[in-house]
Structures are given as structure tokens and as C-alpha cells.
Amino acid sequence: MSTSLYQCLIPALNLSNAHKVCEVACGTGNGVPILLNHLPSDAEIWASDISDEMIAKVNQRQLPRTHTAQASNDALPYEDNFFDRYVANLSLMLVPDASAMLREAYRVLAPGGTAIFSVWGREENSTALGYFEQACREVIGENFAKKRSNFYLNNAHETMRMATEVGFQNPHYFYAASPMGPIGIEESVQCYLDTPHLAGIKKQSEENYNRIVERLREIVTEMDRRNEILMFEGVVIVVNK
């Protein structure tokens, strides 16, 4: 899902004249080759992630013109005004303080530069993730409902307002959707079983895990009867400094 959304970010970044690109929360580095394919041959990428395990996986790929750093999104080890592009794919809604991350993005981006942020989109259109949260709310109940939903930044106008409050200008947005992949009940359920979200729940409670899996199977069965497939939607915010 994250890789398919990453492809949608490229046109808005106008990479043909970029030279220094910052990517935060890069994970295993799936987005770096996508960037390299669209950058000038002398451009470089600085990829960071809060997890040293993720950075180790990026380093194993031996990607050209790529520098790596273990760092949180709100405390980057770079100079002020260093980059002409900044990319944050599906991480702004995960950090404890989105405004702090936006301020740090503004700090490291040079005047005239472009920053792009993607977050989970509208829950009703992002069924792959919406169904998961629905099942968790129904099974876990109040304790899960108290948690901040990862959909909380899906109001594009509110997120753009947050970005302009820290100094960004010329905000624009668009929605991008893609299928989660599989067609069929068991194949769709298996996609959930492979996620770290369910793995974390399983560690906490085997009973809750089993009930959530059963509820997801029921939801997906109804979806399949409607001849639908699981979808993911992201909302993308593009701003300038």
C-alpha cells in the first residue's frame, strides 16, 4: 500500500530539478529507488527512520547516492535550509506531535523547496484499514476507542491549516486510492494476518486476536458478496517554503 501511494507522490514533487531530497520514516527503503528513478543523476537522498533495524535494512540494499540516519521525524540531524525536497509517506499521523514534525520539516527545507506529506485517507474509502479499526473497536471496545485513530489527520483542510501555521505556503491536496491486492475472502483475511497491527494484538491477548480475526472474516465475507475488494486511500498534502 505504501509503495503504491509513493508512486502517486512523484508528479507533485517535480524532481527534475531537485538536488537534495530528505525522506523521513523511510522504513526498509522501498521509496528510495522510486525517487532515484526520477531524480537527476547528481542528486542525493538523505533517508532517516526512528528504527535502527529499518535503517540496517536500507543499508543492506546498498542504494546509490543515499545517506542514512537513525532519527525521529521531529529531531533530524540536518542543518537548517539544507534540502530542496522533503518526503514523508504515511508517517505524519503516527508521530506523537504532528505539529512538531511539521516544524522540523520546515526547518530543514530550503526556501523555495517542496514538502509532501501523505496520511491515511477517508475511512469510508480506505476499507482495508477502516475494516481493521472497526473490528478492533467492536472486539476490544472502550480501550481501543480511547486510542487516537490513525485516520485523525484525514481532513485535508485541517492538515493544510496545521502546515501553514508553521510557515508553509501554497498548500494543495489530493486523494489517491489503490487496491490492497487480493481478491477473495481467505486471501483478504491473510493480508490482515500478515500485518504488524495484528501481531501486536496477539502478543497482548490471544483471545482478542482470535475474535478480531473472526470478525474480519465476517466483514470481508460481506464485502466479497458485494463483489468488492479491499481498498486503501491516502490523502496527500503538498506545500512550499
Image (cartoon, rainbow, N blue to C red):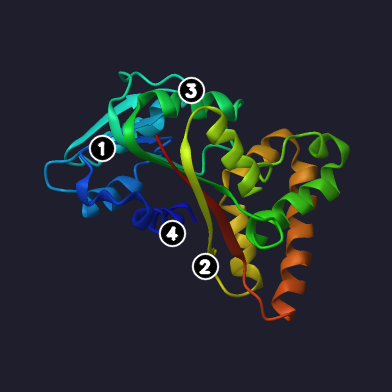
The residue to which callout 2 is attached is 181
The alpha-carbon separation of the residues under discs 1 and 4 comes to 22 Å
Residue 38: quarter of image: bottom left
Q: Are marks 4 and 2 in contact (CB under 8 Å)?
A: no
User: Depth check: 131 or 73 in front?
Assistant: 73
Q: Nearer the viewer, mark 1 or mark 2?
A: 2
* Relative depth, front residue between 51 and 231: 231
Mark 2 and mark 3 lie on one chain; the one further toward the N terminus is 3
Work out whether 25 lies above or below 189. above
Q: Amino acid at mark 1?
A: Gln
* Mark 1 in CB contact with mark 2 (< 8 angstroms): no
Q: Splitting the image into 4 quarters, where does residue 185 fall?
A: bottom right
Amino acid under disc 4 = Ser
Compute the Cα span from label 2 to label 3: 33 Å
Answer yes or no: is residue 23 visible: yes
Q: Mark 4 against mark 3, which lies toward the viewer?
A: 3
Name the secondary structure under disc 2.
loop
Q: CA distance from mark 4 to mark 2?
A: 11 Å
Split into 4 quadrants, where in the image is the C terminus? top left
The residue that label 4 is drawn on is: 4
SS category of the residue bearing label 3:
loop
* Amino acid type assigned to the residue bearing label 2 in the image: Gly
Q: Earlier in the sequence, mark 4 or mark 2?
A: 4
> Which residue position is annotated with label 3?
74
Res. 60 mark: 1
